[in-house]
Amino acid sequence: RLTPLELIPILSFILQGGKCRKCACKLSLVYPLYEIICGIVFLLSYLSFGLTPELIIVITFISMLLIIFVSDIGYMIISDEVLITTLILLIIETIFIYDLSYLFDSIFNGIIAFIIMFLIKMVGDFLFKKESMGGGDIKLMFFFGFMLGWEMAIICIFIASFIALPVASLILVTKKEHHIPFGPFLNVAAILVLLLHIDITAIIKMII
């Protein structure tokens, strides 16, 4: 069991020399890097939304995305426990910060995004004659719709695909790997849309 002194982000890793205090086993650099990235993203969230009640919801959502980013890359898993816990927190926070009407609108947007992503998966499965997308990615889209609206949730798919293309191509060439998690790219897209306050109205104006 880790003591409080072993749970201080970044500092604990440095003080322990990158090793476990008890068995001296070398600790992965993933831990301090993840903690640094979390700190940076939380700071950017504060700079984007300020010290407002909305920041609480944003931090909750982004925390989920960061956890999934690591789990999907490392194990190709999007944990239901993480999704359910986040959903409960988002519902409670939305009721207190906004109201029930806003909550129902958010849930409706989440359901629409979920259905659209499910249909995309069905088309992909039919075209490729195999599973084209994991169920976790579909569940994740509910949260995108909940937070960003269903229109921007769909935009996130295109942004994620654009980001994923060069990375996936490099992995396919160097590692001959044909199973690449899409969740991390979706999460990066969602964080960009959220922190940059990109909305569907701005995109339509750019196109027109």
Image (spheres, rainbow, N blue to C red):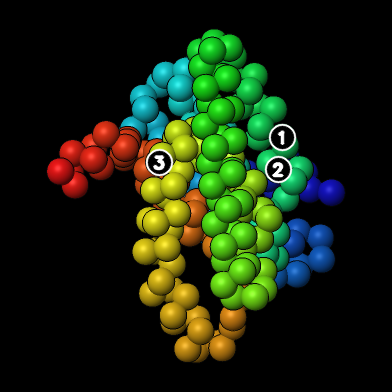
Question: Residue at image x 57%, y 66%?
Answer: 124
Q: Amino acid at mark 2?
A: Val
Q: Give x and y (percent) for residue 155.
A: 39, 48
Question: Which residue sits furthest left?
Answer: 208
SS category of the residue bearing label 2:
helix
Quote the CA–CA distance across marks 1 and 2.
5 Å
Above/below status of 126 relative to 32:
below
SS category of the residue bearing label 3:
helix
Residue indicated by mark 2: 82
Q: Amino acid at mark 1?
A: Thr
Q: Are marks 1 and 2 in contact (CB under 8 Å)?
A: yes
Question: Residue at image x 43%, y 58%?
Answer: 160
For marks 3 and 2, the one nearer the N-term is 2
Residue indicated by mark 3: 152
The disc placed on residue 85 is 1
Above/below status of 117 relative to 61:
below
